[in-house]
Image (cartoon, coloured by chain):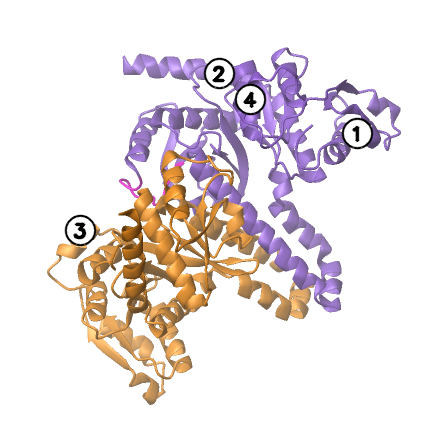
Chain colours: A purple, B orange
Amino acid sequence: MGGESGPSVIVPALLNCLSKHKSVEAILYGDLQEVALYLSLCHDQALLSRIELVHCEGEVLDTDKPSDVIRARTPSSMSLAVEAVAKKYADACISAGNTGALMGLGLINLRTLPGVSRPAICTTFPTISGRSYVLDLGANVECSPEQLHQFAILGSLTAHLLDDIKEPSVRLLNVGVEEGKGSNQLQRTANLLSADPQLNYCGFVEGDGIFKGLANVVVCDGFAGNIALKAIEGFAMMIATILEDLLRSSWLARITLGIMSRSFEGLKHRLDPALYNGAYLLGLHGIVIKSHGSASKKAFENALEVAIEAAKHNLPKALAPLLTDKFRTNQKESV
Amino acid sequence: MGGESGPSVIVPALLNCLSKHKSVEAILYGDLQEVALYLSLCHDQALLSRIELVHCEGEVLDTDKPSDVIRARTPSSMSLAVEAVAKKYADACISAGNTGALMGLGLINLRTLPGVSRPAICTTFPTISGRSYVLDLGANVECSPEQLHQFAILGSLTAHLLDDIKEPSVRLLNVGVEEGKGSNQLQRTANLLSADPQLNYCGFVEGDGIFKGLANVVVCDGFAGNIALKAIEGFAMMIATILEDLLRSSWLARITLGIMSRSFEGLKHRLDPALYNGAYLLGLHGIVIKSHGSASKKAFENALEVAIEAAKHNLPKALAPLLTDKFRTNQKESV
């Protein structure tokens, strides 16, 4: 059981989640001694009966190379969780561990959906009007135009299935919105996207446009996506620290915060990075959700919610025929 | 006179700036009829006598191609302002207009400092502990390792000169901090930087590390830098909008805001993007400052402050011998 805090965060988050979702059952892979400690704090026997425990001593460290993890003979909590999805014991798996290893295990055990060469890490960013799907966020540092096209299709179909948007608007992340801006690779990608009749491609978007809600789906390579995601996380954390210092600085501030608590809760609810934790490894024959390594209990709970939402929509199964149709049509047209 | 608001923002900002800095004089290039309208609101004759007006009908539009601007026969307010620096009529020029055109005019009129092949757009980002210089922010979408090495030297020397830091820490923006992360280009750049004995190179930094103040100088290509900058601008604007809605939503909120105004001013002062407006076109034989096109009066005033700070330190003149030393030493070592 990975992440920086392991069972101390994951078990309480799971207990909260199971008390909300009565029809959900869980399998916990990890060091059962440690897990038992946190489970013992729960006295709801009916709830506990919905958790299956699988003891496992193998562990994937953040420093482990994905290739070593895949070749390892001793199963790890991560490899067992991914296998459970492959063998249909589970509808989704969630991990807060090593992203590269999770991606490698996902690829080996679940393989990619039709027409998808590599999965993308995808999550939703808050916008002024709702949320936008952004991908890739770091799985593929360099991407070919063809791969970015695949991500556009995956993102568009996901926004359609999960957010019920008829024709999701898709934009490419760039350093300007004018045609001709950006690298040759981006120009070629823009051509591919605008030539695809099944995509509602709307042109380029700059970093600020994501938060203005200018697109339902924003496509970028894993380098740009990861830089943007982490920069915003860092900026949000800085604001939170400054606000906290400010509110601690005087009794007047503490009193006014008390008066304003409901309004501030509203703001926190919109901005809290915890509420955007849980990224899809999109493009696999199975649901794999990556939680932030340093996720809090609330943040891990959100990753569980993301997994449940995807499982309810049976996301990979719903994507597969749509992808087949899409790629078939594209191939026909290009003949 | 460029930018989205032109003289209506620039003239009042300049008047404020001149009233603060008694030894500063200004030359205004633009449509004098329009300028006069805003100048007429000022009745301080001594202050007005420090402003020289140069009428000019030519204008660079945001949609103009840099190559067309450089070749244009009619001088524009932008070309005259850059020429004024080249001809030593002015110590610095500030523009809120077309970035590509400003860069082109800067290159043609001012040429690059020794050892610098292309200038970089550089600005400071707020961090939890102060500020960090980040470059390039969009002038060079794709950069060679050698160019990134030049940016590292430029950034390091600038932080040394302006912020009086003895050995500024320099880091490369990447999707992870472990060696081996990122593209081959970044690996090669890391090798160049760590082999330079005159740089305090400290390794990679992720997007969130900028705001944690993990480096005095963060180096990246213009694509990554621009995406990060704009994403943060967009995120900050979204927060501001949500906060405003929240505070407008109830009388209680408005009263508490009144009580808290001083604390909130402190927060705003740290976060207000206006206070980080004004980017150096670093690496030219002259000071050229780019203001955001949609800068408010306060933001443009900050760009003027950035120009004055650079002029007080005589930045390009101070950089030139240091760069010569640095490149000479590097060349000696590589012999």
**Which residue is under mark 3?**
B67
> Between disc 2 and disc 4, whose residue precedes?
4
Tell me where residue B15 sits by quadrant: bottom left
Marks 1, 3: nearer the viewer: 1
Judged from the image, the secondary structure of the residue bearing numbered disc 3 is helix
**Which residue is under mark 4?**
A68
Mark 1 belongs to chain: A
Q: Position of residue A19 (x, y in %)?
A: 79, 29
- Mark 2 and mark 4: Cα distance apart in space: 25 Å
Residue B269 in magenta? no
* Residue at position x 66%, y 21% in the image: A76
Seen from the viewer's position, the closer of residues B255 and A238 is A238
Judged from the image, the secondary structure of the residue bearing numbered disc 1 is helix
Q: Which residues are magenta?
A: A172-182
In the visual, does B16 lie left or right of B319? right
At label 4, which amino acid type do we have? Answer: Asp
Tell me where residue B52 sits by quadrant: bottom left
Judged from the image, the secondary structure of the residue bearing numbered disc 2 is loop
At label 3, which amino acid type do we have? Answer: Ser
Callout 2: few (<14), some (14-19), or many (20+) C-alpha neighbours within 10 Å?
many
- Mark 4 and mark 1: Cα distance apart in space: 25 Å
The quadrant of the picture occupied by the C terminus of chain A is top left
Marks 2, 1: nearer the viewer: 1
The quadrant of the picture occupied by the N terminus of chain A is top right
Q: Position of residue B173 (x, y in %)?
A: 45, 45
Q: Position of residue A213 (x, y in %)?
A: 48, 42
* Residue at position x 57%, y 25% in the image: A102
Mark 3 belongs to chain: B
* Residue at position x 63%, y 67% in the image: B263
Toward the left, the furthest residue is: B73
